[in-house]
Image: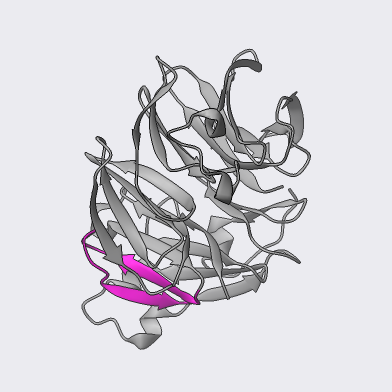
């Protein structure tokens, strides 16, 4: 089993995780973090099949958990999930902003859906291969997308027009032809962007459109996030890498899976403030202090 995706509930008390078999498991962080926690507290409180193939992406809104499988998106009511799962109606990477659902997937395009009506209102075309990842740059209201074609594309969400295209694999300091040119992870923080995949994980200044740091991490990085003065990344290898913005790898924190696909931070709820990581294992590691693993949930 491999864990492909994670998302915390709006209240921060629950963690949803999706695997390669199309299953979603719901864990109670309140129970797992309790002083009286037992082995049973680290098991799912709910486990159900959401898709015929892998659950590639999970995303929480204020009311729903969205899951993306092969060619479909499903929406699950959080209120009902806590009791039992409910199937509503509703591709690979998903993101929401201002009551819009931004979807990228296998047709090489980005689709924007109005979440109130369920109608797709616009399509952003430009990628020449399927899309792996999406993120949103709030101040400029820009959508960033990364794909198998090796490009990071930046779009103005107000006009749905392209703003920039960065072909990361064409930068010598980032290129790693032995791993390919695909972009598997994206994150933004103010004027900064993280991206990686086939090319090395790198930090970019979005005003100058140039890489300022390249991180000497082996293998492909599948997810990276900004957190305070650190960059945290997971990918090939059994560890979470803590990197400094200048390009130094400060620490590598051991994890249970031999390789990692997903990293999630629960920072909204101070009582349940955790980092969780999952990958090539049925176990999801939980970090209450981000410098060491506290325990593992078991899918």
Whether residue 98 appears in this view of the structure is no
Quarter of the N terminus within the rendering: bottom right
* Residue occupying the point 75% across, 51% down: 72
Residue 83, how many percent across, how many down? 54, 69
Residue 277 in magenta stretch: no
Which of these two is toward me, 217 or 115? Answer: 217
Would residue 255 appear left or right of 118 to someone viewing this image? left
* Residue occupying the point 24% across, 82% down: 36
> Residue 80 is drawn in which quadrant?
bottom right
Which of these two is toward me, 190 or 95? Answer: 190
Would residue 28 appear left or right of 251 to someone viewing this image? right
* Residue occupying the point 58% across, 74% down: 47
> Residue 78 is drawn in which quadrant?
bottom right
Q: Work out whether 85 lies above or below 243.
A: below
Q: Work out whether 149 lies above or below 256.
A: above
**Outermost bottom residue:** 39
Q: Work out whether 299 lies above or below 174.
A: below
Residue 146, how many percent across, how many down? 58, 36
Q: How many marks?
A: 0
Residue 197, how many percent across, how many down? 52, 46
Which of these two is toward me, 229 or 199? Answer: 199
Residue 283 in magenta stretch: yes
Would residue 102 appear left or right of 235 to someone viewing this image? right
Q: Which residues are magenta?
A: 281-298
Would residue 70 appear left or right of 29 to someone viewing this image? right
> Residue 295 is drawn in which quadrant?
bottom left
């Amino acid at each position: 089993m491999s864990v492909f995706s994670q998302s915390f509930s709006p209240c921060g008390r629950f963690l949803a995780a999706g695997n390669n078999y199309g299953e979603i498991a719901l864990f109670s962080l309140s129970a797992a973090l309790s002083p009286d926690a037992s082995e049973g507290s680290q098991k799912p409180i709910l486990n159900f099949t959401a898709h015929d193939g892998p659950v590639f992406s999970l995303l929480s809104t204020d009311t729903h958990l969205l899951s993306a499988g092969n060619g479909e998106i499903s929406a699950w009511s959080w209120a009902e999930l806590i009791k039992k799962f409910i199937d509503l109606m509703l591709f690979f990477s998903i993101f929401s902003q201002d009551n819009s659902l931004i979807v990228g997937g296998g047709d090489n395009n980005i689709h924007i859906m109005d979440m109130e009506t369920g109608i797709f209102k616009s399509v952003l075309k430009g990628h020449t291969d399927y899309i792996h990842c999406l993120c949103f740059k709030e101040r400029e209201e820009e959508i960033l997308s990364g794909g198998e074609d090796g490009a990071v594309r930046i779009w103005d969400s107000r006009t749905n027009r392209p703003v920039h295209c960065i072909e990361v694999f064409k930068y010598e300091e980032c290129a790693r032809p032995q791993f390919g040119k695909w972009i598997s992870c994206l994150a933004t923080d103010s004027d900064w962007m993280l991206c990686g995949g086939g090319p090395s994980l790198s930090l970019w200044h979005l005003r100058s459109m140039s890489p300022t740091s390249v991180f000497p991490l082996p293998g492909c990085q599948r997810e990276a996030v900004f957190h305070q003065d650190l960059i945290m990344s997971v990918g090939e290898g059994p560890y979470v890498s803590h990197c400094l913005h200048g390009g130094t790898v400060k620490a590598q924190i051991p994890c249970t899976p031999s390789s990692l696909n997903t990293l999630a931070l629960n920072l909204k709820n101070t009582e349940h403030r955790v980092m969780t990581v999952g990958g090539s294992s049925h176990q999801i590691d939980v970090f209450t202090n981000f410098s060491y693993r506290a325990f593992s949930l078991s899918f």
